[in-house]
Image (cartoon, rainbow, N blue to C red):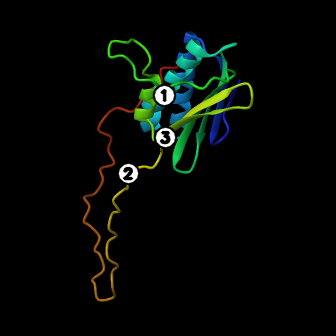
Amino acid sequence: MISHPRRHCTVELQALPSRIGQVRRIVSAQLRYWHLDALIDQAALGVTELLSNVHRHAQPDKTCTVEIELLLDRLMVSVRDRDPRLPVVADADPLATCGRGLAMVAAMSESWGMRPDGDQGKVVWFTLPTALPAVKATPRPARRTAADPAPRFAEVEPVSRTPEHAPARSAVVG
């Protein structure tokens, strides 16, 4: 199920490797719709890591819900699953091939966290700032006063009315 309200998007899915790419594309499309193209890479990376954790660790099933919500000054991305066990962030061995997902989410996000979701689940979330850099204001030209001379019209050469090429012809017989 996918919902696309104005400031909220929810996707329910089984966290299987084939579905994770699909959810990344949905998140990317929604962020483009909200004109938040600059956040696509970070949001896609974060949601991939959270869904990979559900795929790898969640019990009894892999059913989860991804929510993205556009708030006033940030984007909130969360993944809810049915496993009540909260993830543990540990220092990964330098040669380990896994175990760095939540550290990456923490490094690339403004904030992140996790919370129990009733007795039978949890929510892991992160936020990204949506504030755009300040745009330098263009100074307005000064107003003309009565003492200023009126602007003069520019001299324009006459327009030739003769065509420089042959008229278009229709390729349709008729």
The reply, left or right, for residue 95 in relation to residue 40 is left
Residue at mark 1 to residue at mark 3: CA–CA distance: 12 Å
| 57 or 27, nearer to the observer | 57
Closer to the eye: label 2 or 3: 3
The answer to whether marks 2 and 3 mark residues whose Cβ atoms lie closer than 8 Å is no
Upstream in sequence: badge 1 or badge 3: 1
Tag 1: amino acid: Gly
Q: Which mark is residue 62?
A: none
Can you tell which quarter of the image residue 167 is in? top left
Name the disc covering residue 111, or none.
Answer: 3
Q: Is residue 125 rendered to the left or right of residue 98?
A: right
Return the disc, 2 or 3, that comes first in the chain's sequence: 3
The residue wearing badge 2 is 133
Cα distance in 3D space between marks 1 and 2: 22 Å
- Residue at point 43%, 14% (across, down): 98
Residue 95, percent from left and from top: 33, 12
Above or below, 57 relative to 146: above
**Residue 46 bears which disc, if any?**
1
Find the distance from the CA under tag 2 to the CA under tag 3.
19 Å
Between 170 and 113, the one lying in front of the other is: 113
> How far across and how far down the image is residue 64, in percent?
66, 22
Q: As displayed, is residue 126 above or below residue 148? A: above
The answer to whether any part of residue 173 appears in the image is: no
Q: Residue at x 73, y 24 (%)?
A: 120
In which image quadrant can residue 82 be found?
A: top right
